[in-house]
Amino acid sequence: MYDSITKIGQPNDRIKAFKDYFTELIEKNKKEELNNCIQKLVKSSDTIVSRPSIAFVGEKFNEMEKDTSHFDLIIELSESILEILHESGSFFDTSATIREICARILEKKQEYSGAARMLAGIAIDSSKKSPAEKCAHFVRISQLYLEDEESARALPYMNQASNYFSKCKDTNTKVRYHLCWANIYDFDRKFLKASRSYYDLSLSVIKDDLPSVLNKAMVTAILSPAGPQRSRLLKIMYNDDRCTSFPVYSSVEKMYLQRILREHEIEQMDSLLQEHQRAEGVDGLTYLQKAVIQHNLLAASSIYNNIRFEELGKLLGISNTAAEEIAAKMIAEKRMEGYIDQVENIMYFEDEGASLVDWDYQISTICRSMENVTEEIVKLHPTLLK
């Protein structure tokens, strides 16, 4: 059939004949014949006919996409066609069109990673697309990977999106860009960064997306390591009227007010977490358990001046050795003020207010000493005052 069509005189007539032939082969799922014909056209020097004829395949798939019963057929036929077009190194537009169609289909079938891989096959960096379009393309790939919680696969595409982000003016793309970064931090258990990103995003997202983003901001704040940075975040959310209607707000309130959390309250928090947030660390504790232990340790510092590690371990629900290790780490990381007497096995707490008092006292002592020294110098050398 290919040879017969090539013998037709006028280019437009040849193009129409190829389109009719492709329609028949696609609708009857004659995959081998379709591939053979496309392969010959790709190698043909008659680009006036080959390019619009091959482009028609994308147009036909676009038309068929409207009917869900054609989804599997489009995907099946596309795999081999894309391989042929890739080997040729040409036909970028047709290849991109087919990949876009397949990505939409796979996304509708909730095969998100497959859709992302389909889009990743488009060589958009070397295309004539604008920086904003390239940024949107890489953000979309990242979003699809994140739907399957594949943050490691999403990250390289977010880095590529960052190369074009400064020239992106589209508000929707910018919001999706920031949301992807927040999700990556979340999936990578960098909860403090995730919480900040979600909360910043809550100030710019549309009303429909606000509940989800604000809820994630509070949940990840709870999971963040205890310390001054988390305390600042909790204070912001505690004072934000938008947060008060969420079930997780009661946990934010208790943590901000530095109340010691009990087992039943931890169970309530756990019910609000996503699956990846329930993962265990190398120490065998979940991120929520670690966050609560650290929080309760900080809360204890507002109640006690000092406490034996045996009692502190009971209060935190862990061994006294584990309590000492956590306290030492938090002090070393400047997330808690205090010091440890290892001989007596006692934890001494110092609050920020006490530190400031000590600092003021030291300054006043130095000033008084300088004043005394000045008086003695004047006694010995009175002419210095003249």
Image: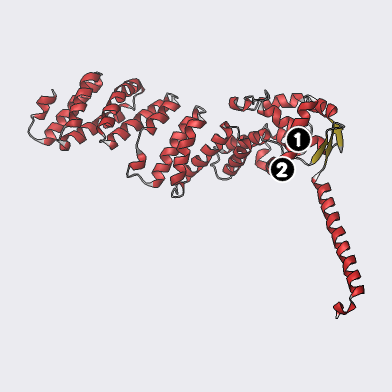
**Picture coordinates of residue 304 (x, y %)?**
86, 36
Q: Amino acid at mark 2?
A: Pro
Residue placed under numbered mark 1 in the picture: 328
Q: Is residue 65 left or right of residue 261?
A: left
Identity of the residue furthest to the right in this view: 379
Quadrant where the C terminus sits is bottom right
Q: Is residue 330 visible?
A: yes
- Category of crowding for the residue at label 2, using alpha-carbon neighbours closer than 10 angstroms: few (below 14), some (14–19), many (at least 20): few
Q: Which mark is residue 101?
A: none
Which corner quadrant of the image does residue 107 belong to? top left
Q: Is residue 28 above or below residue 195?
A: above
Between 321 and 74, the residue placed more toward the observer is 321
Residue placed under numbered mark 2 in the picture: 228
Which corner quadrant of the image does residue 61 belong to? top left
**Picture coordinates of residue 21 (x, y %)?**
18, 25
Which corner quadrant of the image does residue 48 belong to? top left
Q: Is residue 264 left or right of residue 274?
A: right
Name the residue at 24% across, 32% down. Answer: 88
**Picture coordinates of residue 17 (x, y %)?**
14, 29
Q: Is residue 133 left or right of residue 33?
A: right
Name the residue at 59% across, 24% down. Answer: 275
- How many numbered marks are there? 2
Name the residue at 25% across, 21% down. Answer: 27
What is the secondary structure assignment of the residue under circle 2? Answer: helix
Quadrant where the N terminus sits is top left
What is the secondary structure assignment of the residue under circle 1? Answer: helix
Q: Is residue 277 left or right of residue 382?
A: left
